[in-house]
Every structure is written in structure tokens, then in C-alpha cells.
Amino acid sequence: MKQSTRYGLAGLGGLALLTLVQWARQEHLQHGAVLTYLIGVGPNFAAAIAITFVLLGAWAEQRPGADGRGERLRFRVSAAISGGGLLGWEAVQMLSRNLVFDWQDVLATLAGIAVCFVLFAVIAPRSKA
């Protein structure tokens, strides 16, 4: 399987999780404190994963054949764009009167980026030593 396909599938998994969380919100499935919390921060967590791997998948498709070092750099840039964009959006919310800033969303974004590092370690090409 091509690397771009693996990254794309990870991105689709993040999008599927995001869709599931949004559906749970619309259906008012917040029963209990833990589920309410997870549904509240879930979009940031899932979006961090989805954005990172969709970007990485597109990049890998456009320029295939990168070595392990190049692939890690692409991943870090993709994760930085994802995390930076989501954290930037939280900063905008902090300055707005109509939007709600939440530190828990910031933590969920950081947790999503951390999960991206684990996923990347699992699906990235292994360098031949």
C-alpha cells in the first residue's frame, strides 16, 4: 500500500471520528460527565488528527518517494499546521464576544497532535539500517 494511502486512511479515520462526535452532539447523547466532556472536546481532538494526516497524505501523493528523514519533516510540518491552525482558532475565540474559548479544547488539540505522533510512528516507512 502506498504511504499516501496510509496517511489518507488515517486522515479519513480522524474525519470519521469528527463526524461521529458531531452526530453525538446533534443527538444530545451527553449522558454522564465523562461522555459530555468527550463530546465537548472531541471535535478538536479529531480535527487535529484529520488535518495532519489529510495534509500529509496529499503531500506524499504529490511528491512520493521521500526518505525517512524527509517523511518525518513533512509530518512535523503537517502537525504544526494542524496544531497551529486549531490553536489559532482558539485564540480568535478568546478575543471574540460571540465565541467561547475553552482551555479544555486547547488540551484536546494538543492530545490529538500527540496521538498523531504515535500514529505516524506506526504507519511511517521504516528506515533500513
Image (spheres, rainbow, N blue to C red):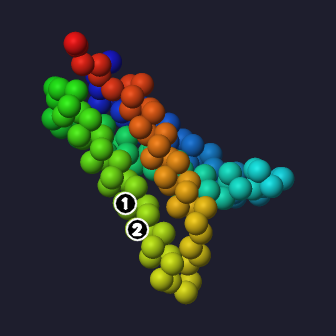
Tell me the element at label 1.
helix
Q: Is residue 13 left or right of residue 70?
A: right
Q: Position of residue 40 (x, y in %)?
A: 66, 59
Name the image quarter holding the N terminus.
top left
Cα distance in 3D space between marks 1 and 2: 6 Å
Look at the image and tell me whether residue 64 can be seen.
Answer: no
Q: Is residue 21 left or right of residue 117?
A: right
Residue 62: image quadrant is top left
Q: Position of residue 100 (x, y in %)?
A: 59, 75
Name the image quarter holding the C terminus.
top left
The residue indicated by pointer 1 is 84
Mark 2: few/some/many CA within 10 Å (<14, 14-19, 20+): few
Q: Position of residue 13 (x, y in %)?
A: 50, 37
The residue indicated by pointer 2 is 88
**Residue at the image point whose x is 35% and y is 48% from the top:** 79
Does the CB distance between marks 1 and 2 fall below 8 Å? Answer: yes
104 and 100: which is toward the camera: 104
